[in-house]
Image (cartoon, rainbow, N blue to C red):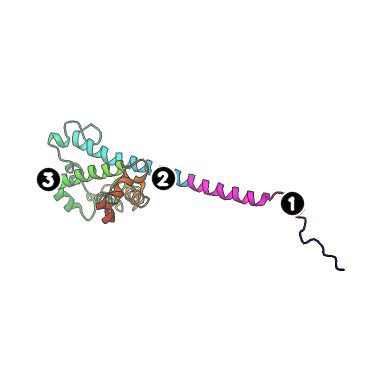
Amino acid sequence: MAVHQPTHRNPGFHLPSYRRNRDESQTESAVSDGADTRTAQAYVFASARVLMGFVFLWAFLDKTFGFGYSTASGKGWIDGGSPTQGFLGNVAVGPMESTFHAWAGAAWADWLFMLGLLGIGLALTTGVALRVAAFAGTVMMALMWAAEWPPAKHLSDGTASMSTNPFADYHLVYAVVLIALAAASAGDTLGLGRWWARLPVVRDHGWLR
């Protein structure tokens, strides 16, 4: 007569699996850290965007109303002064010296310059059309760089140019920052970038983003 052993087995006693819990906790912590880092980066870019916007807006306001900083009181645009005459008219170095002299004080140059300052400043401050602002701002900074011409050690009259760096000056730094802000979609935080991106015309024309 055959004797059959019971088929079920005692599962025994097992300690809780702490390793799996630890791995899950580490994964959740890594995800949380990554999210915090991205949030911090977004706010840093947004802060840089607003500050850059104020740089351009202040230049527009000071040149328009003559607050007495870079533009003397009573010499503002609304007082009949020319926003480009002082800067372009005093260019004294570089291959475009005569060209800038010819542009200085021209009505079209004044309007383009002032509209550029206002448009770039508003775009950066509100966080919309950052790609357009980056392009326009880069062109403006390149022209201003050429007007100061940092590579030259001496001006046209032979005096020292006082250039501190033959290539990298603040105009190039501003241009790179503008491009970085557009590439990072810096208008999505503390700005109207997300709303702007949802507009049909912006969705159909990515360069307006």
Residue ranking furthest to the right: 1
Which of the two labelled residues, at mark 1 and mark 2, occupies the earlier sequence position?
1
Q: What amino acid type should be assigned to the residue bearing mark 1?
A: His
Q: Which residue is mark 2?
A: 42
> Quick one: SS at disc 2?
helix
Front position in the image: 32 or 178: 32
**Residue 14 drawn at (x, y percent):** 74, 51
> Quick one: SS at disc 3?
helix
Q: Which residues are magenta?
A: 9-35
**Residue 126 drawn at (x, y percent):** 30, 41
Q: What amino acid type should be assigned to the residue bearing mark 3?
A: Ala
Cα–Cα span, label 1 and label 2: 47 Å
Q: What amino acid type should be assigned to the residue bearing mark 2?
A: Ala
Say above or below: 7 vs 173. Answer: below
Q: Which residue is mark 1?
A: 14
Which of the two labelled residues, at mark 1 and mark 3, occupies the earlier sequence position?
1
Residue ranking furthest to the bottom: 1
> Of circles 3 and 2, which is in front?
2
Give residue 107's mark.
3
Front position in the image: 6 or 66: 6
Say above or below: 63 vs 96. Answer: above
Front position in the image: 14 or 56: 14
The crowd level at tag 2 (other Cα within 10 Å; few <14, some 14-19, many 20+) is some
Location of residue 64 by image quarter: top left
Which of the two labelled residues, at mark 3 and mark 2, occupies the earlier sequence position?
2
